[in-house]
Amino acid sequence: MVWSRLGGMARTFIIELTRPVEEMLAYARGKAAQKGALFEGDATSGRYLGKKVEGSYRVEGDRIAFTITRKPALVPWSFVELKLRRILGGG
């Protein structure tokens, strides 16, 4: 864990690639757009900015390291991880 710039804790989740990274990211971009959020980047790194969640990602071989730097205080990290894995198709 690292401290986020917003004064709270940030967490990084590692997600195994189950299909080509471009395909996973295109799906995530579509989901973000449906919710009015920004998901930008390429097959190496990028960022996510939504109304309640903010983060960045970097691709490391056959995995994506997704760091969440902002989330609602009352939302547990386990829920954030579950949603992230569903959006990226890793769980």
Image: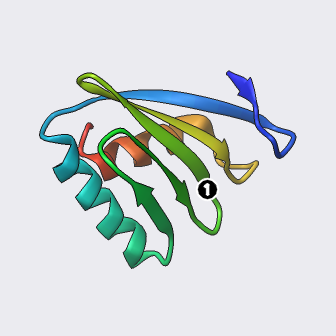
Residue 60 in which image quadrant: top left
The amino acid on which the numbered mark 1 sits, given as a three-letter code, is Val
- Residue nearest the observer in this picture, 14 or 85: 14
Q: Residue furthest left?
A: 19
Instruction: Residue 21 in the image: state x and y as whole percent.
Output: 21, 42
Instruction: Residue 81 in the image: state x and y as whole percent.
Output: 47, 38
| Residue 74 in the image: above or below residue 26 | above
Q: In this rendering, would 53 be left or right of 36?
A: right
Q: In this rendering, would 60 be left or right of 13?
A: left
Callout 1: SS: loop
Residue 84 in which image quadrant: top left
Residue drawn at x 47%, y 29% as measured from the top left: 13
Q: In this rendering, would 60 be left or right of 6?
A: left
Instruction: Residue 42 in the image: state x and y as whole percent.
Output: 34, 50
| Residue 15 in the image: above or below residue 8 | above
Residue drawn at x 58%, y 65% as measured from the top left: 50
Assess disc 1: are there few (<14), some (14-19) or many (≥20) residues with their C-alpha within 10 Å of its C-alpha.
Answer: some
The residue labelled by disc 1 is: 53
Instruction: Residue 12 in the image: state x and y as whole percent.
Output: 54, 29
| Residue 57 in the image: above or below residue 63 | below
Q: Quadrant of the N terminus?
A: top right
Q: Quadrant of the C terminus?
A: top left
Residue drawn at x 15%, y 34% as measured from the top left: 18
